[in-house]
Image (cartoon, rainbow, N blue to C red):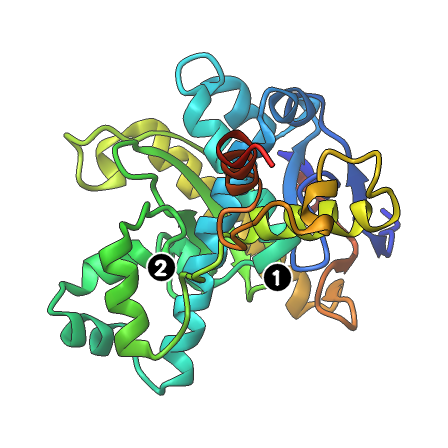
Amino acid sequence: MRYRLVKINKLSGYEASLYSIYLEDEQRTLFERFLEENKNSFKSELTNILLRLNTIGHHTGARKQFFKSDEGKPGDGVCALFDIPKSNLRLYCIRYGSLIVILGGGGFKPKTIRALQEDKKLEDENSLMRKISLDIRKRMDDKEISFTDDYMDFEGDLIFNDEDDE
Amino acid sequence: MMKTMSKAETYNSKIIDELFDSISPEEEEKIRKRMLLAARIDKAIKAKGWKKKDLAEALKKRRSEITRWLSGTHNFNSDTLFDIEKVLNIDLVTLKDVPIEQVNKFHMVFSQTVETANSSPYGELLSGKSFIDLYQGEKSLFYARSNNKC
């Protein structure tokens, strides 16, 4: 999989930077794919999610309280945006403090399932975010990626290609 | 392969722009205020040296309910906000005796009429032939006109 980290202009502001994963094969980000997949069936939920993300970027920062933590492995930052009451459209993210969030994908989580492992689509989206978090961690350990001085952005080699690692 | 070292590319998304185009400012304001309210409550909990469980205990609520309140998605009712204000000793709902918009309007109109008293329909106010209730603004002026006929 070849991808790169991109900063979403519209949602990023003085309080937080919102990133997503641009998939070279699909020519779109994971977050755009999530929006495309759900825009017809869950438009009002998507609107709510977009407005919350916009508020995070421009007004509040990515406060921990706005996310459902521990959706990945301990310390990997994988979380989900808090589910809207009466809706179960779930969006997975990776949170780096209150200043950076990477938006991934997600999908509909029906009330009838309790764990993400019961839904193949959600499990795949979650696994992908865990993998991306690990990729970034490796690059940070190797000092190929770092935070900017104000901790608002990533800098370094932000292009990933699984073939490089083989 | 040579690795590049740079900041992330700034990305503009057509679908995000399209979705935003269909959102009303009122909708945006409502979501923003819910999140700012949740953030304010969270800050107050921390300022008091409390945790979520302390607020839950003080208000006799479950911790999961406090988590939902703080998520920025909750539509609070006024009684809940009053209860939170009381235990956290913060101001979440501003209540004033004077309806601010009407008073502002009155001040604006009144200051305009000082210069144009003769031509203004509010000229009566300056000549003492009418009365105005500060709290009711224009509504009282209308009442004075229609009843006093001065």
In the image, residue B12 above or below residue B100: above
Asked whether A50 or A90 is in front, the reply is A50
Q: Amino acid at mark 1?
A: Lys
Q: Which residue is mark 2?
A: B70
Distance between the alpha carbons at the discs numbered 2 and 1: 33 Å
Q: Amino acid at mark 2?
A: Leu
Residue at x 57% of width, y 59% of height: A60
In the image, residue B107 above or below residue B56: above
Q: Are the residues under marks 2 and 1 on the same chain?
A: no
Q: Chain of mark 1?
A: A
Q: Is residue A121 left or right of residue A165?
A: left
Residue at x 42% of width, y 42% of height: A127
Residue at x 43% of width, y 55% of height: A66
Residue A70 occupies quadrant? bottom left
Q: Which residue is mark 1?
A: A138
In the image, residue B96 above or below residue A163: below
Label 2 crowd (10 A; few <14 / some 14-19 / many >=20): many
> For numbered disc 2, what is the local secondary structure?
helix
Outermost residue toward the top in this view: A40
Q: Is residue B57 left or right of residue B149?
A: left
Outermost residue toward the left in this view: B60
Label 1 crowd (10 A; few <14 / some 14-19 / many >=20): few
The image position of residue B125, as x and y in percent, is: 68, 47
Residue at x 73% of width, y 59% of height: A153
Asked whether B37 or B73 is in front, the reply is B37
The image position of residue B37, as x and y in percent, is: 44, 58
The image position of residue A106, as x and y in percent, is: 43, 33
Outermost residue toward the bottom in this view: B49
Q: Nearer the viewer, mark 2 or mark 1?
A: 2
